Image: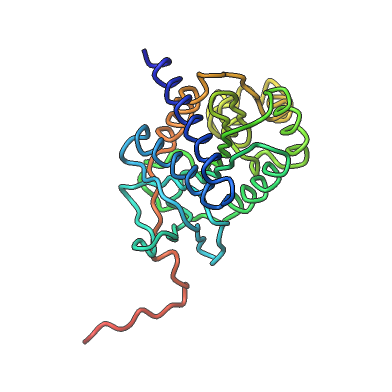
Amino acid sequence: MLHKYFKDISCELERKSQTIREHFATHRPSAGENREGMVKSFLREYLPGKYAISSGLILSKEGEFSNQADIVITDRMSNAPLFGYVNKKIWLAESIYSFIEVKTQLTPSTLDDSIKKCKRFKELPRNFAADFGQQKIKESLFVLWAFEGPSPEKIKENVANKLLNIPQDKQPDFIVVPGSTIVSAGHYYEISKLGQKNSTFRSKKLAENNGKLELLLGAGFEVNDLGGNTLLAWLVWYTSWLHAAGTRRAMLDNYVPDDFIWGRTVK
């Protein structure tokens, strides 16, 4: 039974995280890297093969970089990184589906840190290739994955305080505490409630509420206490969004200045 299977996976991740805590208590950077490795292994096993799971920096056409990403999910079939032969790769912004930040604990300070990284990531300019209608969604997701957290009620209180003045499109899309809680916010929450921009459903909902988006989104986020069902629920929601997003492709020539001289045609 699928739900029991993923409950077992969740318990196994928790057990491994505790083992890391015990054996790497005096060297936190190694503990963090090991937990990132656990999340990467989970994603490689359960995301479809067309998505690449990697890490590194994200570069925009304007030369702006994101923070170092613990994990990035990219379109494997249409893109390759720069410096692909090293651990700290560089990915072009248009190739990215999502940026995943891995934390040991979900605390007010780790929320602050992740929200700053999320804002910087989401503000990177993107100039997507025209893929004949294959790209359906242009936004990219930011996911905060924390192995430990307080009660769902306390998570809701902390998230409400931290997101109070953060625009909807600059918020993390998921906060995941396996075996406990999922918070949906940001772009994902908006699209899950209203559908895609310019859709008939969204237009109808906006018309019914005098075009006031805030009336439809309420608090702008939702906290779900799912216990052992957390991993399965998140995987369903996340992969559904990935499939809906369509293809992603960065065009290398977009990263070359408009006045760049390539060379000459030999006469």
Q: Is residue 110 above or below residue 42?
A: below
Question: Where's the N terminus, which quadrant?
Answer: top left
Number of on-image labels: 0
- Residue drawn at the location 44% of the way across and 64% of the way down: 254
Q: Nearer the viewer, residue 43 or 208?
A: 43
Picture quarter containing residue 172? top right
- Residue drawn at the location 65% of the way across and 36% of the way down: 106
Q: In the rendered view, does 42 fall on the left or right side of 184? A: left
x and y percent of residue 100 in the render?
52, 43
Of all residues, the one furthest to the bottom in this rendering is 267
Q: Is residue 114 above or below residue 229?
A: below
- Residue drawn at the location 57% of the way across and 18% of the way down: 226
Picture quarter containing residue 193? top right
Q: Is residue 12 above or below residue 118?
A: above
The chosen color scheme is: rainbow
Q: Is residue 253 above or below residue 241?
A: below
Residue 245 seen from this side: yes
x and y percent of residue 239 in the render?
42, 31
- Residue drawn at the location 51% of the way across and 43% of the way down: 23
Q: Nearer the viewer, residue 35 or 177?
A: 35
Of all residues, the one furthest to the left in this rendering is 267
Question: Where's the C terminus, which quadrant?
Answer: bottom left
x and y percent of residue 81 in the render?
38, 58
x and y percent of residue 58 in the render?
50, 57
Q: Nearer the viewer, residue 66 or 244?
A: 66
Q: In the rendered view, does 132 fall on the left or right side of 110? A: left
Residue 211 seen from this side: no
